[in-house]
C-alpha cells in the first residue's frame, strides 16, 4: 500500500463519518480515528518496507449540517423542545421521506402517528430500511431533508407525545 492509497483511505474515512477504521493486511496495520478536531492515523508495519512514510494527520471534511426541512411560518421565540420525543436515525445512510418518488411523504408536520408507524426509509448499502416510530403522538418538526445523508443517532423528527 503506497502513500497515495493511504491518503485516499484517510479522506474516504473522514467523509464517511465513521469514528474509527482498522485495516490489517499482511505487512501493514492501519488505524484511522476521526473526531471533531482532527483525524489521527496510525500505521504499523510488521516488516520494514522501503519508502513507507508516516501519513500526516488530515483535517476531516466537515459533514453538511442537516438543516430543518420545514421552518415554522411564525417567528416565535425558540420553543422548549425538552417536552418532545426525538426520533433518531438508527443507522448511517440516505433518508427518504416517501416510499417512492410518486408517493406522498410518510409523515408531515401535524401528522398523528402510533408506535410502529413507518416515518421514513433509510437506504444503507443498497438496502432500504423502514424506520418505525417507537412512540405515539403528533409530528412537531421534521429535522432532516428528503434524500439527504444521515448519521447514526441523528435527530430526524420531533414528536409531541401528549
Image: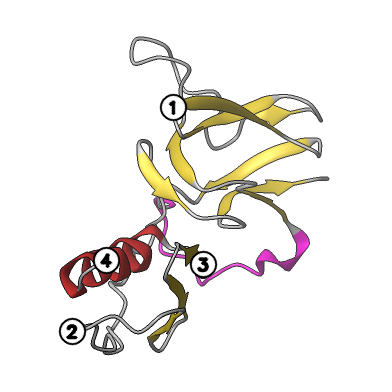
Q: Which mark is residue 51?
A: 2
| Secondary element type, mark 1 | loop
Crowd rating for badge 4 (residues with CA inside 10 Å; few <14, some 14–19, many 20+) = few
Is 80 covered by the magenta stretch? yes
| Secondary element type, mark 2 | loop
> Which sits in the foreground, 121 or 11?
11
Is any part of residue 70 visible from this angle?
no
Question: Marks 4/2: CA distance?
Answer: 11 Å
Is the residue under label 2 in contact with that under label 4 (CB below 8 Å)?
no
Answer left or right for 34 relative to 82.
Answer: left
Q: Where in the figure is residue 36, as x and y percent of width and height?
A: 44, 83
Which residue is depicted at the point 66% across and 70% down?
80
Mark 3 or mark 4, which is nearer to you? 4
Q: Where in the figure is residue 133, as x and y percent of width and height?
A: 73, 35
Q: Which mark is residue 1?
A: 4
Mark 3 or mark 1, which is nearer to you? 3
Residue under numbered circle 3? 22
Q: Which residues are magenta?
A: 72-83
Q: Which mark is residue 159?
A: none
Question: Marks 1/2: CA distance?
Answer: 39 Å
Which residue is depicted at the point 34% across and 16% down?
101
Question: Marks 3/2: CA distance?
Answer: 22 Å
Mark 1 or mark 4, which is nearer to you? 4
Q: Which mark is residue 126?
A: 1
Earlier in the chain: of badge 3 and badge 1, it is 3
Amino acid at each position: 500500500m503506497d502513500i497515495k492509497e493511504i491518503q485516499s483511505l484517510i479522506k474516504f474515512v473522514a467523509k464517511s463519518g465513521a469514528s474509527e477504521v482498522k485495516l490489517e493486511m499482511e505487512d501493514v496495520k492501519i488505524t484511522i480515528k476521526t473526531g471533531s478536531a482532527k483525524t489521527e492515523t496510525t500505521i504499523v508495519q510488521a516488516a520494514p518496507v522501503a519508502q513507507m512514510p508516516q501519513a500526516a494527520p488530515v483535517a476531516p471534511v466537515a459533514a453538511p449540517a442537516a438543516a430543518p426541512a420545514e421552518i415554522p411560518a411564525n417567528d416565535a421565540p425558540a420553543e422548549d423542545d425538552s417536552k418532545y420525543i426525538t426520533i433518531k436515525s438508527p443507522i448511517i445512510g440516505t433518508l427518504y421521506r416517501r416510499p417512492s418518488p410518486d408517493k406522498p411523504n410518510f409523515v408531515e408536520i401535524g401528522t398523528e402517528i402510533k408506535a410502529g408507524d413507518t416515518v421514513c426509509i433509510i437506504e444503507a448499502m443498497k438496502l432500504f430500511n423502514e424506520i418505525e416510530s417507537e412512540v405515539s403522538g403528533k409530528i412537531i418538526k421534521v429535522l432532516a431533508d428528503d434524500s439527504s445523508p444521515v448519521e447514526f443517532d441523528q435527530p430526524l423528527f420531533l414528536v409531541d407525545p401528549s
